[in-house]
Amino acid sequence: MKAVFLLFDSLNRHMLGCYGGTRVPTPNFDRLAARAVRYDNHHVGSLPCMPARRDMLTGRMSFLHRSWGPLEPFDDAFPEILAKQAGTYSHLVTDHFHYWEDGGATYHTRYDSHEFIRGQEGDAWKAMVQPHWERLREKYHPSQFSDKRRTYKAQNIINREFIKEEKEFPSVLCMEAGLDFLRRNGGADNWLLQIETFDPHEPFHAPARFRERFPTDYRGPVLDWPRYGRVDELPEECEELRANYYAVVAMCDELLGRLLDEFDAQGLWKDTVLIVTTDHGFLLGEHDFWAKNRMNVYQEVAHIPLLVHDPRDPAKPGESCAVLTQTMDLAPTFLEMFGIAPTPLMEGIPLRAAREGAQRRDAIIYGYFGGAVNVTDGRYTYHRYPPDLRKQEIYQYTVMPTHIFMPFTPEELADARLAGPLPFTKGAKVMQVPVLERSPFHDKYGPGGLLEDETRLYDLAADPGQATPLHDPAAEARMVGLMARLMAANHAPPEAFARLGLAQP
């Protein structure tokens, strides 16, 4: 068995032609969908970037216990299991720089080898001690200009001084590195290649030939990085931001096409699995919001694409699968492909078992640590918030106390205590760290940054755009029951129920 896992970041399902999108031509996503199973009810789990990847690697959700952080010593990571139990070689090619920050530092080392392409967003890549800030200030829109060191926006401005030609774009280099692996190793057996590009994550920086396809009336400085929050830009600025996203999606489609060409050239379709998906979507003004992390987890963020080609059971032309699946199903799926059973700690279901009806679920939960817990059964979505996001009692459970790009502060750790063992920590006790409003994590990547906190129920059949919350006590009670059961199955701590006013099963 051989497998290629292509992972994009912030790829909107509804933009793809195979899912009904019309704004951006995506001939290569459509080309893959013609010979793959299109999963129509695939959803996120833990959010955003690295929490989603922890779900993918370990086959279980973490957002009820932990925010953004490294893999823990007790986590089961599928690349390591493949190596130990099947001798399967795994290789990661990525330009996703979060793997090299404090909060992602134990992920890439789970693979046998890894290759890092530099330069995306705030990657601490190129050094300019004295940038020409005044020239650069004129080049970029005020909303995305910064000259403050150790900020993503300032570093991105410097990085982009070294990315001029299309061949220098990180995602282009990332795909080329993945194709190089296939050219050298495609004839071998028993390997897994993960090609992971940060695009179309913001900033929406694409080569000119892609951007030219989406003209706007905007005539100002570079504007391709939306703020996380409410839409308050001028109409032409909104169109410019969207057009830049469309351009990056078009580039991602072409990169996928290069991979499909390599499958054609080597005849890999007959013996190599190909899975293409993303970690979450991205709001482009829907619900009057940009981005993610600040608002309710609307369908544009939660409902994501998944295309699977499995030569063991080839898809019928245009075949789709309507069963509920989510990101944590990827780990047991890769294990099953190589003849390995999921570990006892994995909550995910192998996609083949879900597709064939051997294992199905009636609902899923998803969310951000400290925010709402969200549940869907495919018909309804229910988003339940605590009464006060800033006063809730909530703890992080970890032995790897780091945030996205910094360790926990001494103040955060001052009141930490030893807890457990928890049911999923393999006998290890963990730190129980109270979430402080004063934490640097709280307002930017935690519950303090949320701008919506209203518990809501939506009927997706009658209201697919989630425009009008539904008042239906019977439906809400049923969704509450599903939520509580799934939280208990994930071994949610007692305060996770208390903060939401739920009885613990």
Image (spheres, grey):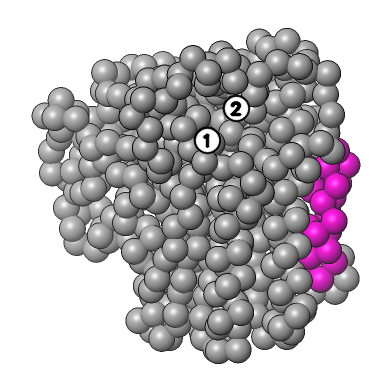
Asked which secondary structure carries label 1, the reply is: loop
* Left or right: residue 450 compared with residue 468: left
Q: Is residue 32 magenta?
A: yes
Give the spatial CA distance, label 2 vs label 1: 16 Å
What segment carries the magenta color?
14-37
Q: Quadrant of the C terminus?
A: top left
Dot 2 corresponds to which residue? 225
- Determine whether label 2 and label 1 are within 8 Å by CB: no
Residue 43 makes an appearance in the image: no
Q: Nearer the viewer, residue 4 or 77?
A: 4
Q: Quadrant of the N terminus?
A: bottom right
* Left or right: residue 211 compared with residue 80: right
Quarter assignment of residue 183: bottom right
Residue 12's spot in the image, x, y percent? Answer: 70, 42
- Residue located 44% across and 57% down the image: 116
Residue 198, compared with residue 348, is above or below; it is above
Residue 458's spot in the image, x, y percent? Answer: 70, 30
